[in-house]
Amino acid sequence: MVMIRMEFKNILEERFATKNFDGKKIDEDKIEQIMEMIRLSPSALNLQPWKIKIIADENLKEKLSPASMGQPQIKSCSHLLVFCANSDLKGNADRLISDLKASGIPEENIQFLESVLNNFLSMFHGEAGIHEAQHNTFIPAITAIYAAKSLGIDSCPMQGFDPAAYSEILELPDNLVPSIIVPLGYAADKPMPKVRFPKEEIFF
Ligand SMILES: Cc1cc2nc3c(=O)[nH]c(=O)nc-3n(C[C@H](O)[C@H](O)[C@H](O)COP(=O)(O)O)c2cc1C
């Protein structure tokens, strides 16, 4: 079982968008724990429409740096997570139904889910399917930043990169769209004060 070492509120308060990492490598067992926590992320109809490329290779990070506006996080991080939306919603739906059948869930529940899924798939195809997958793909990225912090690892959610260039460098298939990246490592910088709008302005 994964040991969470920090209170969730402390994780929220202490995590910050790291601008530069110190180059120290994250132990593989911690990466495994982060991967497992990411895997538990929720998604619409449990379609999990994402694939996540994990990059520790220095040459590859070097190649991705210019496609990331030269932001220092890319070369200085230990591991770079590239969260790709997977537009193959139908493929994931088929896979999910077969996994549910194998899990022993009653047939009538599966049939109900299958009809909901078919309805869902009829609404989200083409561009709409990609957008739906992209919305969902932000969820595991957010899991990643908090999961990492729970293990004392710093991170930065980033959209300042060129998705087309990433696709080319990483030789991604057409159905995978890089949507958000999260470098992980140990911060070489200090957090800025947390500036947030007051709750009276946020909640109504
Ligand atoms: C969707 C998204 C995209 C972001 N893109 C970048 C980025 O490209 N580069 C960067 O340094 N920070 C990026 N950030 C970090 C934000 O600037 C940062 O979260 C925000 O200023 C609040 O600061 P804090 O996270 O340290 O509390 C991004 C954050 C989000 C959620």
Image (cartoon, rainbow, N blue to C red):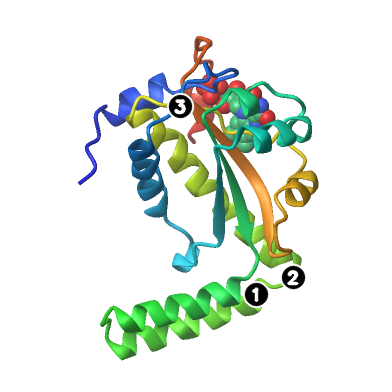
Regarding ligand 1, which quadrant of the image does it lie in?
Answer: top right
Per the model, the C-alpha gap separating discs 1 and 2 is: 10 Å
Per the model, the C-alpha gap separating discs 3 and 2 is: 40 Å
Q: Can you tell which quarter of the image residue 50 is in?
A: bottom right
Residue nearest the observer in this picture, 15 or 70: 70
Residue at point 55% right, 28% down?
156
Marker disc for residue 104: none
Q: Earlier in the sequence, mark 3 or mark 2?
A: 3
Is residue 157 shown left or right of residue 144? right
Is residue 144 shown left or right of residue 76? left
Marker disc for residue 123: 1
Depicted 71 relative to depicted 181: above or below: above
Depth check, mark 1 against mark 2: the one in front is 2
Depicted 10 relative to depicted 192: above or below: below
Marker disc for residue 126: 2
Mark 3: amino acid: Lys
Marker disc for residue 25: 3
Residue at point 27% right, 86% down?
106
Depicted 34 relative to depicted 185: above or below: below
Q: Can you tell which quarter of the image residue 56 is in?
A: top right
Q: Any atom of ligand 1 within 8 Å of the CB at mark 3?
A: no
Q: Any atom of ligand 1 within 8 Å of the CB at mark 1?
A: no
Depicted 26 relative to depicted 28: above or below: above
